[in-house]
Amino acid sequence: MSRVLVTGGAGFIGSHVVDRLLEAEDEVWVVDNFNDYYDPDVKRRNVAHHAGDAKFHLQELDILDETGMDRVFGEAKPELVIHLAARVGVRPSLDQALLYEQVNVRGSAVVLKTAKQHGCRELILASSSSVYGCQKKTPFSEDDPVDHPVSPYAATKRAMELIAYTYHHLWKLDIVCLRFFNVYGERGRPDNIPAMFTQLAVAGKPIPRFGDGTTKRDYTYIDDIVAGVLACRGKQLGFEIINLGNHTPVSLNDFIEAIGEITGKKLNVEERSPHPADVPITFADVSKARRLLGWEPTTSLQEGLEKYYQWYQQMIKRA
């Protein structure tokens, strides 16, 4: 049993990580500020089933609050920090660039600084496939240059990686930055494309298609992502950046078709102009994850969407 602190632990990915940690009998401290990017009650429901578990400690706190973070680290004394808290989403970052910089860059610096001060030597940080920008070489490898981000969100995630390396270099912290590729699944954010398209399909509303539908995304199911996060534990890799993706890009046209098949709905596609922050493809080279973590994605898009849709139908019945 370990003491683990998870930032953003009530969110989509974070709550699934917390589930797995508690199943493994770890003592888990969750830091989440329940911001209004989407309905905070959704995030509260994500972790409500852990109420009463003596191993679960929930702290409603912003990672920018240095005093509060110092207090929580002092109480938790974590052996491992899994830093998932962030302002997410490429498109919203265009209108809120300063907020994204504050949370994703300065907030991450607060987490790193506080971990160092309290003697925590191991951190796993959530980065993003967005750092690869519009590069044409595929699949995307961790050694590829990432000097041309096309959104403030992407730039902040790359900045976080650089700050993390500095903490490793100066203070020898073991840090793994995981570049997540298009994560979807149960509890997915409402602005997440699989969640949004499913909701629109069920409601009989038009599905927006930006561009001609040939852009491709490497959709990765939540269970595979969580397995990758936890595979980093105790590896003592020094500093590494590792892709976690499904290694199987799917075009937007094929994805929309898959949503229609899963939901059994006839879809009305509404044409939209391409968005300037969209990239033509995301495509993960996962050979490094395979070599260092023994990790492999195991969930096809069809299987993952079926699981998500089953969950979604249950949520509708409960509403």
Image (cartoon, helix red, strand yellow):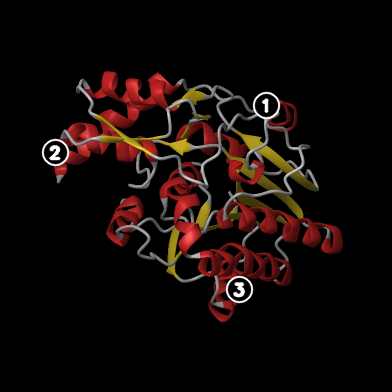
Q: Earlier in the sequence, mark 1 or mark 2?
A: 1
Residue 289 or residue 202, whichever sits in front: 202
Say which residue label 3 marks: 74
Category of crowding for the residue at label 2, using alpha-carbon neighbours closer than 10 angstroms: few (below 14), some (14–19), many (at least 20): few
Q: Amino acid at mark 2?
A: Lys
Say which residue label 2 marks: 317
**In this view, 158 is above or below 23:** below
Q: Amino acid at mark 1?
A: Thr
Category of crowding for the residue at label 1, using alpha-carbon neighbours closer than 10 angstroms: few (below 14), some (14–19), many (at least 20): few
Mark 1–mark 2 distance (CA, rounded to whole Å): 42 Å
The single residue placed furthest to the front in the displayed view is 273
Question: Which residue corresponds to the image point at 44% horizontal and 57% vertical from the top-left?
Answer: 92
Closer to viewer: mark 1 or mark 2: 1
Q: Earlier in the sequence, mark 3 or mark 1?
A: 3
**In this view, 158 is above or below 317:** below
Q: Amino acid at mark 3?
A: Gly
Q: Are marks 3 and 2 in contact (CB under 8 Å)?
A: no
Residue 120 at x, y percent in the picture: 70, 62
